[in-house]
Amino acid sequence: MREWLSLPVVDNMNGEVIGMIPPRQWLVTNLGTIQNYDGGGGYVFVDSNGVLAQYSEATPWVELDEAVRWGFMDRGYSVTAMAV
């Protein structure tokens, strides 16, 4: 089960979850850029138009390119298991 203090990283090409990273201020997610988080699922995001949105129980995810940019993952990741 996913902890609140981790965000799934999604492969840009196939949409598979390939890892988990911690949330950080200014990290770009599918819900916008993280402005603040409380560690319990509460986030404040800003979108590309500068609109702030607050979510009490958000479940954002991060694309691989963003995780690589922040140094959390290597672009040459390898999948070690697959469920079918």
Image: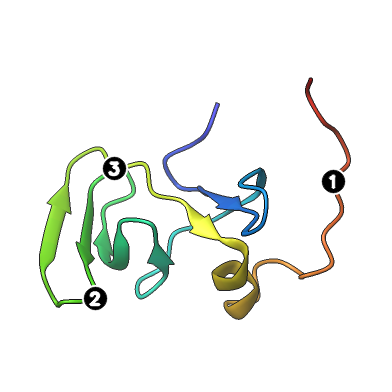
Q: Secondary structure at mark 3?
A: loop
The x and y percentages for residue 48 are 24, 76
On the image, numbered disc 1 is attached to which residue?
79
Contact (Cβ within 8 Å) of mark 1 with mark 2: no
Marks 3, 1: nearer the viewer? 1
On screen, residue 30 above or below 50: above
> In the shown orientation, is residue 83 left or right of residue 72?
right
Q: CA distance from mark 2 to mark 3?
A: 18 Å
Residue 56 lies, in percent from the top left, at 18, 41
For the residue marked with disc 3, what is the amino acid? Ala
Q: Which residue is found at the position 30% from the left and 64% from the top?
A: 32
- The answer for how far apart the CA atoms under marks 1 and 2 are is 32 Å
Q: Nearer the viewer, residue 26 or 29?
A: 29
| Label 3 neighbour load within 10 Å: few <14, some 14-19, many 20+ | some
Query: Marks 3 and 1, how far apart in space?
Result: 27 Å
Q: Earlier in the sequence, mark 1 or mark 2?
A: 2
Residue under label 3: 58
Q: How many marks?
A: 3
Q: Amino acid at mark 2?
A: Ser
Residue 37 percent location from the top left of the image: 28, 57
Q: Residue furthest front?
A: 13
x and y percent of residue 8 in the render?
55, 47
Q: Of tags 1 and 2, which is closer to the observer? A: 2
**Which of the 4 image quadrants contains residue 40?**
top left
Nearest to N terminus: mark 3 or mark 1: 3
Q: Which residue is mark 2?
A: 48
